Amino acid sequence: MISWPNLVSQLFNGLALGALLALISSGLTIIYGTLGVLNLAHGAMFMIGGYAGFVAYQYTESFIIAVIAGSLFVMLLGVAMERVIIRHFYHRPHEDQLLVTFGLGICFVEIIRLIFSSQSQLVPPPAIFQGITNLGFMFYPTYRLAVVGIVAIALGALFIILYRTRLGMIVRAGIEDSVMVDSLGINVYRVFMVVFGIGAMAAGFAGIVNAPVVSLTPGIGDDILVQTFVVVVIGGVGSFPGAILGGLIAGEIISVTSMFNPGYAYVMLFAVMTLVLVVRPHGLLGVQGRE
Amino acid sequence: MTDYLIRRGLSRRGLLQTTAGLIGGSMLPAMPAFAEDKPAIGTYPAGVSGSTAFIGISVPRTGTYAVQGEDELKGYQLAIEHINSGHDLIKKISPKTSKGVLGKELKFGVADSAAKPNEAVQAQQRFISENKAIMITGGTSSAVAVALNKLAQREKVIFVCGISGSNDTTGKDCVRYGFRQNFFGQTAAAAIGPVMVREFGKGKKAAYLTPDYTYGHTVTKSMQDFLATAGWTTVTNQVAPLGAPDYSSYLLNVANSGADVLINVNWGHDAVLSTQQAKQFGVLDKMKLVVPYQVPFIARETGGLMQGVYAATDYWWTLEDKFPLAKMFNEAFEKKYGYKPEWGAENAYVSFAHWAHMCEQAGSFNPPDVIKAYEKGETLPSLVGDVHYRPEDHQCVRPVIIVKGKQQKDMKNKEDWYDVVEIVPGEGLMQKPDAFGCHLGDYS
């Protein structure tokens, strides 16, 4: 059913959906852009962020501590993963990288299932963000509005790290040409470790921030991983601004299409991805020739 | 003794022949009925030539239906344990069962279907080929049930269906080798529809949340058809893929639809998530919620959002106040697993008990004989009273239970989520056997 109030509602909802997708995708795209590793465990790390935050919330009943705990835990997990496993795969074929990260993702999911079972777990939003807000043209969950703001701040922080710090400069240089960065005497492997940790932290942060919107289950990352890849492909692999643009586009496609025919929401998402691949194989903001 | 017989003129060859004859003769009464001159079919008789019979079980242990799949699996495991030990409850349903089925101990293998038809079919094909499964089961997704129906008919192995709510399972996709115990879209609609009209009135506007596969489409269609007779209209039908990660865009459409009642046909975690998000978007404050095909554990997982909500179901544990067998089942299940069984476990248990009974009645595992035992339409005990299977479509005619979510203050314990509002008899709820295009196919 098409009506102006519904269209405006869906456009706004697409923005909120897209913001979250952008945050998750930014972690994935930074890791791939810098390390050249497509991390198929990214969805599982998103999920673990939610569960780590859930555990922290159970003990403290503080949402802020839950967010910090979820983010830090996944960052440490990411660093450990890079140190112990991923770095042995930098010079191996992409297929090996895909397989090892895919396997890690399965292990993470099953460990969580073993501990928490498949039953969903709830993390309530903080008291000030509970309830519904009247936006004039629609009623919208207050916490979802807050998520837009939280994600905007997080993306802003990532932008500053990537574009206003020496580390960011090295990371961006590494994305363009890691061999040249290495030859300039910079310990590129240490940078890789830091980047993997930051990328993982972005996923973990998104996982716990998203937890009050959905209920946590061990498989929650599987669903989001597919969408995240679509976002990265649309925006351009390895491009941080591309992840944001891709996320917003994906959110709007899902939301607006569902207004016309909900059954086609995800079909349309993949159709647009296919179109982008045909017209701009490196994504909307991707750079040709990047490896 | 031997020397004596030989001395008496009996040759050594004659002695051996006589001894073999005596041993063979002494075994005759103990030989099971399947040693008759039945032609081999499916995994029969190879699958039951030893002292055991194997059952292939495929349930979702991951994915959106994982919680319900685990509950269903526990029901199967308890039934097998009871059948093998000759438990009193099994004997109430299948009186001839002593230990095992026809004297064969039941063994089983479990595979995770993830509610995906191809994975379930691959697993069951493996059980049939490698383990000579004499019976297969699985469900918690009608897409899986329909796929296993076809596999069962092709392989000539009996399929005792797990949870499946689609009209198609014993409708257009029915098979000679498939049997379903539980309620389904048509019976759910026919049972809960009158309650909805009574509670909410005539001429209401309904919004639907429908999962995009055979279960969702047929349940929604049955609800729409029934409610149309009371002047209800559908203002929006939001069809979402199985395992959708977010329902916000669908719920905005519902919120803007002007509906009076939200009919949530989603199942498993999809139902939990969509119900929680409906609350977040204020939809549940604007309209009534109805769950026509109740989802095990939804009340607990949604944290009380089912309060005041009507649902149709196969079983609810408080039926033990009315049905002694339900009480026996609840006690045995809770003792073993530490919680009250939901209807997936009940369906699993009863389905296996009925299958064991049919094998005993047939006196054989020979599939056509077992099928014909089902097709006699014999009245059987279940946990909710007497039931029978229709020979025309292999659907069990059984009551549908209407429940209403209790307010928290009325809950007597932490699992006392629902009041049983009505036990609607199965007779009269179901469509005519051929209404959904069922053609069972051949025995062999």
Image (cartoon, coloured by chain):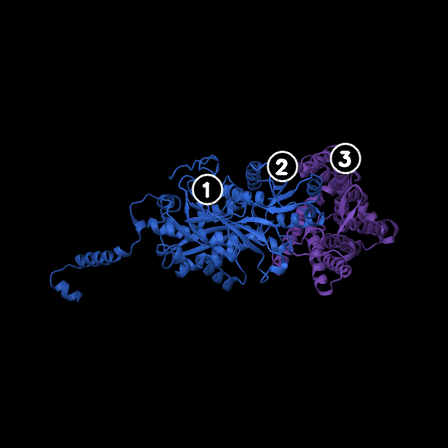
Chain colours: A purple, B blue
Q: Looking at the image, can residue B87 be seen?
A: no
Chain identifier of the residue bearing label 1 in the image: B
Whole-angstrom CA distance, mark 3 to mark 1, is 46 Å
Query: Between tags 2 and 3, which lies in front?
Result: 2
Give the labeled residue for mark 2: B234
Give the labeled residue for mark 1: B428
Chain identifier of the residue bearing label 3 in the image: A
Say what secondary structure mark 2 lies in. Answer: strand
What residue occupies the far top of the structure in this picture? A279
Between B429 and A232, the one lying in front of the other is B429
- Numbered label attached to residue A4: 3
Image-based side of B348 in relation to B92, left or right: right
| Amino acid type, mark 3 | Trp
Question: Which badge, 1 or 2, comes first in the chain's sequence?
Answer: 2
At horizontal 72% and vertical 62% (from top left) the residue drawn is A56
Query: Between tags 3 and 1, which lies in front?
Result: 1
Quadrant of image for the C terminus of chain B = top left
